[in-house]
Image (cartoon, rainbow, N blue to C red):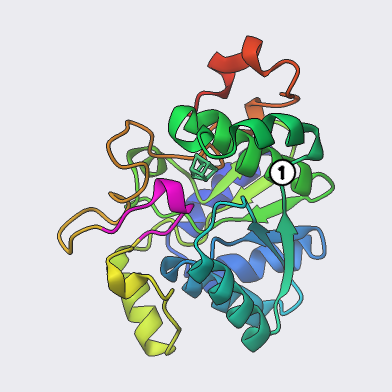
Amino acid sequence: MLSVQKIKRLSEEFETKTPQEIIEWAVNRFAPDIALSSSFQTQSMPLLYMATRIQPDLPVFFIDTGYHFWETQEFREQIAHDWNLNIVDLYRSHSWDTFARQHIRTLPGEDPNLCCYIHKVQPMQNALQGYKAWISGIRRDQTSVRTQANILELQEDGLLKINPLLNWTQVDVKNYMEENNLPEHPLYGKGYRSVGCAPCTIAIGVNDDERAGRWAGRTKVECGLHTDMFSKKNITESNYESQIETIKAK
Ligand code: SF4
């Protein structure tokens, strides 16, 4: 395994590398113990495209929260078929079923942090067990939290998170999409420039920030996957009330 010092040095070196060079290094170093996560929105297409051209059988985690737009599900199906992707769907743990059935309609509005924990964070925690590395598509220009991120981030449990697009901007995404003729999410042209779950996503204006349509009107800007996912563990239906402060995303 790489030392903390080596990871820090590599991460700094990667600031001047292309996403493809970073992905190639990651795949050569960690395959088959490496996975990519994708939300199948328009801005996810470049990373998904370049990574699966480098490693066609790379596991692609798709978190199926049960709250997605139909358009997202259909787009995911289409891309998976056209690009012959190795998709792994992630679902909520059955241990939350009773609670979720009672709160399914109101939970995103009443407690989005708990909802994201149950439907996104915990499924990803479980899926990543046994993997050594995780490729994510976050960019520094997306949120204030992501501004602080590094290209390589060693987690408490030893997993290495790799963010190859960290230095890219919206313009880089747009240019790469055009150069490679990549498809857009069907809602993109209707003002949904960042698409998450239906209850927490609205269409926005052309001059709004890319993620302004996510949890609009709330202070919440992150679901938890890219903040404190690795410090929130073993939260269950029976103990979540006593850990509610822990669940709150940054
Ligand atoms: S984005 Fe909204 S609906 Fe989706 S898991 Fe988070 S709170 Fe729930």
Q: Is residue 107 above or below residue 37?
A: above
Instruction: Please tell me whether residue 163 belongs to the stretch shown in magenta.
Output: no
Picture quadrant of residue 35:
bottom right
| x then y, percent, for residue 184 | 41, 78
Q: Nearer the viewer, residue 243 or 144?
A: 243
Residue at image mark 1: 92
Question: Which quadrant does the C terminus fall into?
Answer: top left
Q: Which residues are magenta?
A: 194-203
The residue at the point 46 percent across, 28 percent down is 110
* Residue 153 seen in this snapshot: yes
Instruction: Please tell me whether residue 200 belongs to the stretch shown in magenta.
Output: yes
| x then y, percent, for residue 80 | 65, 78
Q: Amino acid at mark 1?
A: Arg
Q: What is the total number of numbered labels drawn onto the structure image?
A: 1
| x then y, percent, for residue 148 | 40, 39
Main SS of the magenta segment?
loop
* Residue 250 seen in this snapshot: no
Picture quadrant of residue 32:
bottom right
The residue at the point 28 percent across, 49 percent down is 212
- Under circle 1, the secondary element is loop
